[in-house]
Image: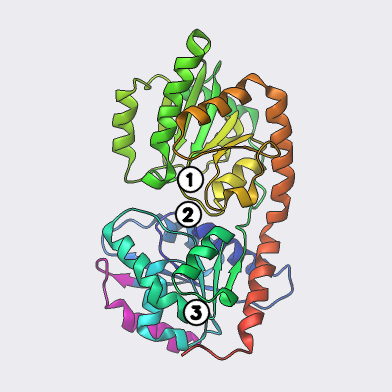
Amino acid sequence: MFLEATTIAGAVKPVLEFAREAAENKSGLAINPVLVLYVRARQENRLLELIQDKDISIEVISERRAFDLRVIPQLRKLARGFQPDIIWTNNTKSHFLIFLSGLHRAGKWIAFHHGYTKEAWRTKVYDELDRFSLPRAERVVTVCNDFARQLQQKGVSADRIRVVRNPLRPSLLVTEEEKNHLRAQFGLQNASVLLSVGRLSREKGHADLLQTMERLRETTGDSFHSRLLIVGDGPERRNLQLLCTKLKLQDCVTFTGHQADVQSYYAIADIFVLPSHSEGSPNVLLEAMGAGLPIVATAVGGLPEILSHEVNALLVSKQDPEQMAAAIARLLNDPPLGERLADAGRGLVVQHSPLAYFRSVVDIFNEVAGESAPK
């Protein structure tokens, strides 16, 4: 199971949930996962530190830079040592390296696709390389039907694509003392709290959300008592902070940076806002619904496959601050509506248990067990 990350976020969480279920063996199945991490010289890797505290087998691939082809001999050595039945890759980099090194012939290869971002040039290069690598996998697992259609455009046969939604493990309750402490920390005692959680990159739409706050303040006037907490970090943080200053929102918007424990932020929020331009099955959405928050989200990617407008969320068009501001204002002015949407959302996430995810993935393992590997 190959991971390309330095913190627990995004694609990492389903992998760790699978490994945890395998270790607990509630299903009675003998699955022995080994996590393989790429660790770059002089780069902090918080993920490695966190996983070492868990009962999970770990192997490290050392690399000096991006596109370091010296990882290939290490990959081949790992394959010879473990002789895996299943090779599980999670991102475009690992997809391509498994194909390039020939390891797609060393075991049954299942590639997990979590969507594409529009960031560094090397990420875009790896994304394009999926056209060469992913069609060779026995199965490509993705999180929504929208992504499945994108995969077909990259040459992956439809009969090899499977859609499995991300899992959600119920979180521990947050005490009133913890909530009061966090509210005091940010001066939120008398404010309605809007929350957005996610990587600060362009496709996540945080610039639209700042413009939404500007619209809310303009239309609400003196009765405006809302605060926005943006939890996360990423390449767009400086640009977003500059935009926040330009829009004169410093008194009502707080950038908290990356937070290892987000549950307390869900606990103090009144509304969760997801302004993304593209999404699959985001963990933060499931977490917010599990925490009992009403949702305002853009109707993009896999979100309309999870959310239904006026049933368990309010859906709006992407890059439309006015429409998003109107939806937020509607929830602020109609608490019973928010409670109804939140109750429906909380009931929906019960279907996303880690054990159900584990069993769905194992079913895919069993599918490929008797098949011949692609040439």
Q: How many marks?
A: 3
- The amino acid type of the residue labelled 3 equals Ala
Near-viewer residue (30 or 145): 145
Q: Earlier in the sequence, mark 2 or mark 3?
A: 2
Nearest to the eye among marks 2 and 3: give it: 3
Q: In the rendered view, would you say 122 is above or below 89?
A: above
Q: From the image, tell me which residue sits under label 3.
A: 137
Q: In the rendered view, would you say 306 is above or below 193?
A: below
Is disc 3 placed on a helix, strand or loop? loop
Residue 260: mark: 1
Image coordinates of residue 322 in percent, x first then y, are 48, 27
Q: Residue at x 42, y 61 (%)?
A: 48
Q: Residue at x 29, y 24 (%)?
A: 246
- The amino acid type of the residue labelled 1 equals Ala
Q: In the rendered view, would you say 64 is above or below 146?
A: below
Q: Residues within 10 Å of mark 1 (few under 14, many from 20)?
A: few
Residue 358: mark: none
Q: Earlier in the sequence, mark 1 or mark 3?
A: 3
Identify the image quadrant of residue 62.
bottom left
Q: From the image, tell me which residue sits under label 2.
A: 8
Separation (CA) of disc 1 from disc 2: 8 Å
Identify the image quadrant of residue 174.
top right
